[in-house]
Amino acid sequence: MKKQDTGEFIIPDGFERSDGQAPFGSHSGPYYQKITSENKLIRALHVKPYHLNSMRFLHGGMLMTFADAAMASVIIHETDRPCVTLKMNSEFLSAALEGDWIEAHVDIVRTTKTIAFARGGLMVRGKMIFKCDGVFHFVRKKS
């Protein structure tokens, strides 16, 4: 697949912009995603100046926002059921900088009739910078 050039950076092979359905995502993104040959969804974020804190690192709240959205997206992708976050745990391991390409790798640990459990991490250049796990409640789609 040919790499897409946004004028600012080159999107890695297989990734496409994912504008999603959540209005908040239009303020916190843009996000990108690809589906692997194993049908796994990988979400990504290109760190822009407006994602940074006063020390010029990616804001911790942005890391949490991206991780939360990535876990929910993977659950929706794999179960075809919408969900909302009940609980999320996070662990900050390292900083991300402007221009970094962050990939979210998430696994569903278990699902029940009403709940999904997920865990994952955010990686920059193959290095884990953030770990997370969460509990999500399946909800009905709004009509």
Image (cartoon, grey):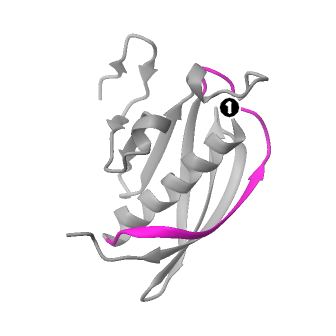
**Viewer-proximal residue among 99 and 15:** 99
Quarter of the image that includes the N terminus: top left
Answer left or right for 101 relative to 91: left
Query: Residue 8 is drawn in which quadrant?
Result: top left
Q: Is 75 inside the magenta-drawn segment?
A: no
Q: Is residue 29 above or below residue 20?
A: above
Q: In this view, does 110 lie above or below 4?
A: below
**Viewer-proximal residue among 20 and 107:** 20
Q: Is 91 inside the magenta-drawn segment?
A: yes
Residue 127 at x, y percent in the picture: 70, 39
Q: Which residue is drawn at 68% across and 31% down?
A: 58
Q: Is residue 80 above or below residue 122?
A: below
Answer left or right for 50 relative to 8: right
**Crowding at mark 1 (Cα within 10 Å: few <14, some 14-19, many 20+):** many
Residue 46 at x, y percent in the picture: 52, 28
Q: Residue at x 38, y 10 (%)?
A: 7
The magenta region covers 81-100
Quarter of the image that includes the C terminus: bottom left
Q: What kind of residue is marked 1?
A: Leu
Q: Residue at x 43, y 18 (%)?
A: 10
Q: On the image, numbered disc 1 is attached to which residue?
A: 58
**Viewer-proximal residue among 6 and 128:** 6
Label 1 SS: loop
Residue 80 at x, y percent in the picture: 30, 69
Residue 65 at x, y percent in the picture: 57, 48
